[in-house]
Amino acid sequence: MQIRWLGHAAFALEHEGRTVLIDPFLTGNPKAAATADEVQADAIFLTHGHADHIGDTVAIAKRTGAPVVAIVELAGEIGEEGVDVIDPNIGGTIELDFASVRLTPAWHTSTTPKGTVNTPAGLVIEMGDKRIYHLGDTALFSDLALPSKRGHIDLALMCIGGHYTMDRFDGVVAAELVKADQVIPCHYGTFPPIETDAQAFKADVQNAGYAEVIVLDPGGTHEL
């Protein structure tokens, strides 16, 4: 599986010719590694409804025909745009023929630009024989330990920028809780309030023995 960081919290997961996009905020993202008209998608998974996470979802879904999986209130709003949506709630699992995704709690807020209030989520994605946990936008809280109780986490995609989410110091504790083999940090460096030192985060996590940390530049890929 190829994991490509598209900048901010956006990722493309590619396996056997199928692509899952997560939080495709590309237009207006100063660190975007691709444009909305060039990325491919067989499905789009959203963590929550803030503008820097919905991003180009509707345009990409209309162009590619990809279904959008988002928590029920957010899916309802997006579905009004004529996009195919799937609408789980926290704890729900959606099974596609090439991947599955389960929504888990994330401690954050979320209201869409159109005013729809929705509950933020983490995403536990199974694709191929790998399990990937995108924590979404979240503070540090103890329930981050729960997804690994269901099954081993191969890779965590973890916000570390601070200000709007947990910072790199809380991220170290989160890495201990999540118990993933590997961690890719995200949601940092996009804007001045979320500048941080990803290499220091890597050193702290690895020195503690919690996980291997892979620091990517936007557009960079990691083979899982």
Image: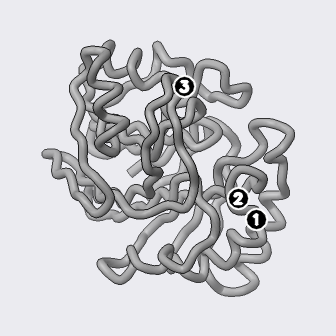
Residue 206, located in which quarter of the rendered image? bottom right
Q: For the view shown, which residue lies furthest in the left direction?
A: 97
> Can you give x and y, in whole percent of width and height, for residue 118 in the image?
43, 43
Say which quadrant the C terminus sits in: bottom left
Residue at numbered disc 2: 160
Which circle marks residue 168 in the picture? 1
Q: Are marks 2 and 1 in contact (CB under 8 Å)?
A: yes
Query: Which badge, 2 or 3, is on the more N-terminal residue?
Result: 3
Say which residue appears at 22% left-offset and 38% top-offset: 86
Residue 37 seen in the figure: yes
Residue at 66 percent across and 49 percent down: it is: 216
State whether residue 62 is above or below residue 133: above
- Where disc 2 sits, the SS reads loop
Horizontal relation, residue 163 to residue 81: left or right? right
Q: Distance of mark 2 from mark 3, alpha carbons?
A: 24 Å
Mark 1 surroundings within 10 Å by alpha-carbon count, few (fewer than 14), some (14 through 19), many (20 or more): many
Residue at 75% from the left image edge and 83% from the top image edge: 207
- The x, y position of residue 113, in whole percent, is 54, 25
